[in-house]
C-alpha cells in the first residue's frame, strides 16, 4: 500500500482525489497548508508527496525546496494548472520526480506514485547497503 | 481619451494578460474538481456493477460538489466577460460600485496567493463616472498590486468610495507606511488618460484616487 501526502489549497479537490486514491488501496493524508505539509513530511514517511504548484502561504516550488532540504530522498510530484516549460525545468532542477497538468488523469498519477514508491524503496535499500558497508569497513571484519 | 505611447499599450496588454492568465488558472482548478467528481462517479458505478452497495448520500455529495463548481465557474466567466467588454468603449458611463466589485474579484486570487484580505466596504450609493472602464480597472489594479505588497501586519487592504459634487474618491487603506508610489510611470499614464488624480498619505497608509465624474471635461480642461 502506497503512502501518499496530498497538498492542495482546493479542499474539494483534495477530498475527491483522496477518496479515489483510497479506493485504489492508497493510504492518503491531505492538507491545504504547505506549512503543515512540511511538518507532516517530517513526522511521517511518505512514498510520494503530490504538491500543487500554486498555493497561498508558500508556493509549490518553495515548498518543494524546503521538503528536499529536509529530506533529499523524498519523491515529490507537482500538479499545476498550466505547466510552462520554465516551471517544469525549475521543478526538475529542484528535484521534483514529475510534473503533471491539472486536470490530471488518475491512472497516470497512480502509475507515477507507484514508480515513486519503487524509487523510494531502491533508495532505502541503497542506504541500508551503504550503512552495512560502512559498518563492515569501520569494524574491519 | 486614448492617445498613447507603445510603452503604455504594452503595459495595458500586460494587465489584460495577467488577469486572463489568472482567470484561466481558476477555471483549471474548477475543471480539476469536476474531473475528479466525474471519476468518482465512475468509481461508484464500477463498485455498483460489482454488487457493492452505494450510499445515496455519497452520490448527493458529488452532485452538490459539481453544482457548486458550476456556480463558481459561472461567476469566473461572468467576470472574464465583463473584463473583455471593458474595452468596448473608451468613453462610457461606468458604475463605481460595479467597477470596484469587478476589480476586487479579479484581484482575489492574487490576494489569496499573498495571504492578503481585500475588504471592500461600499457606501449605499451607486455613483457613475464617464470614463474608460478598462483603464480604470488597470489603475485600480496598479494601486491594489502595490497595496497588497505594502500592507502592514494586519494583511488587509480596505477599499471604499465617496461621492463628491465633481468627483468620486476611491480610498485604499491599510497600506502601511510604504513611501514609494505604485509603479510611477504606469500609474501616471493611467491617471492622465482618466483625467484623475492620486493622493498618497503615507502617515495614514492610505491612497485616494480622485476620479472626475466626466473624464472628458477634465482632460479637455487640462489641454
Image (spheres, helix red, strand yellow):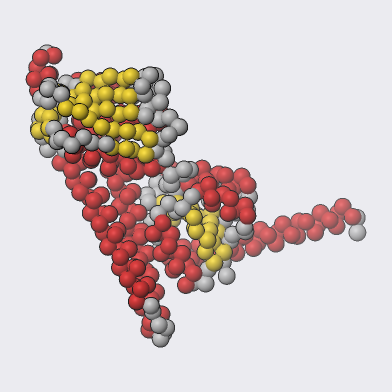
**Relative to B64, A55 lies left or right:** right
Residue pictured at 39% horizontal, 59% vertical? A12
Residue B176: give x, y in percent of width and height: 40, 26
**Is A98 on the left or on the right of B208, as rendered?**
right
Task: Give the x, y percent position of residue A1.
Answer: 57, 70
Quadrant of the image occupied by residue B206: top left
Residue B34 shows in this picture: yes
Quadrant of the rendering where the N terminus of chain B is positioned: top left
Tell me the quarter of the picture where residue A87 sits.
Answer: top left
Q: Residue at x 43, y 59 (%)?
A: A14
Eyeballing the image, is B9 above or below A128? above
So how many labels did they put on this image?
0
In the figure, is residue A20 to the left or right of B121?
right
Q: Position of residue B125 (x, y in %)?
A: 15, 35
Residue situated furthest bottom in the rendering = B51
Q: Inspect this view and state whether residue A88 appears.
A: no
Which sits in the foreground, B58 or B215? B58
Q: Check the image and report above or below for B75 versus B137.
A: below
A134 or B211, which is in the foreground? B211
Residue at the image point whose x is 20% and y is 49% from the top: B78
* For residue B122, side relative to residue B61 (left or right): left
Residue shown at 38% from the left, 43% from the top: B112
In x, y percent, where is residue B33? 35, 60
Position of B112 relative to A47 (above/below): above
Pick the quarter of the image with the C terminus of chain B: top left
Comparing B96 with A34, the one in front is: B96
Amino acid at each position: 500500500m502506497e503512502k501518499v501526502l496530498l497538498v492542495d489549497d482546493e479542499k474539494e479537490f483534495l477530498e475527491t482525489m483522496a477518496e479515489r486514491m483510497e479506493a485504489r488501496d492508497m493510504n492518503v493524508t491531505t492538507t491545504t497548508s504547505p506549512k503543515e505539509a512540511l511538518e507532516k513530511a517530517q513526522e511521517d514517511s511518505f512514498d510520494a508527496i503530490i504538491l500543487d504548484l500554486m498555493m497561498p502561504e508558500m508556493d509549490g516550488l518553495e515548498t518543494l525546496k524546503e521538503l528536499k532540504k529536509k529530506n533529499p530522498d523524498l519523491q515529490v510530484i507537482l500538479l499545476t494548472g498550466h505547466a510552462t516549460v520554465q516551471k517544469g525545468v525549475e521543478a526538475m532542477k529542484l528535484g521534483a520526480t514529475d510534473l503533471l497538468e491539472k486536470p490530471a488523469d488518475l491512472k497516470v498519477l497512480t502509475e507515477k506514485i507507484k514508480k515513486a514508491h519503487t524509487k523510494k524503496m531502491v533508495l532505502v535499500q541503497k542506504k541500508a547497503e551503504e550503512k552495512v558497508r560502512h559498518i563492515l569497513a569501520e569494524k574491519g571484519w | 481619451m486614448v492617445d498613447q505611447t507603445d510603452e503604455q499599450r504594452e503595459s495595458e496588454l500586460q494587465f489584460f494578460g495577467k488577469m486572463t492568465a489568472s482567470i484561466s488558472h481558476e477555471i483549471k482548478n474548477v475543471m480539476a474538481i469536476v474531473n475528479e467528481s466525474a471519476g468518482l462517479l465512475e468509481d461508484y458505478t464500477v463498485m455498483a456493477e460489482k454488487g457493492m452497495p452505494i450510499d445515496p448520500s455519497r452520490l448527493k455529495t458529488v452532485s452538490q460538489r459539481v453544482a457548486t463548481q458550476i456556480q463558481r465557474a459561472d461567476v469566473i466567466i461572468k467576470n472574464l466577460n465583463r473584463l473583455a467588454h471593458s474595452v468596448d468603449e473608451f468613453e462610457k458611463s461606468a458604475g463605481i460600485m460595479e467597477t470596484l466589485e469587478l476589480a476586487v474579484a479579479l484581484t482575489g486570487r492574487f490576494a489569496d496567493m499573498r495571504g492578503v484580505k481585500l475588504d471592500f466596504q461600499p457606501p449605499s450609493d451607486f455613483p457613475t463616472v464617464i470614463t474608460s472602464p478598462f483603464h480604470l480597472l488597470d489603475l485600480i489594479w496598479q494601486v491594489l498590486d502595490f497595496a497588497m505588497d505594502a500592507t502592514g501586519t494586519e494583511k488587509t487592504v480596505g477599499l471604499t468610495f465617496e461621492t463628491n459634487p465633481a468627483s468620486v474618491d476611491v480610498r485604499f487603506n491599510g497600506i502601511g507606511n510604504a513611501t514609494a508610489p505604485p509603479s510611477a510611470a504606469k500609474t501616471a499614464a493611467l491617471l492622465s488618460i482618466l483625467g484623475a488624480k492620486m493622493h498618497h498619505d503615507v502617515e495614514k497608509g492610505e491612497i485616494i484616487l480622485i476620479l472626475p465624474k466626466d473624464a472628458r471635461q477634465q482632460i479637455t480642461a487640462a489641454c
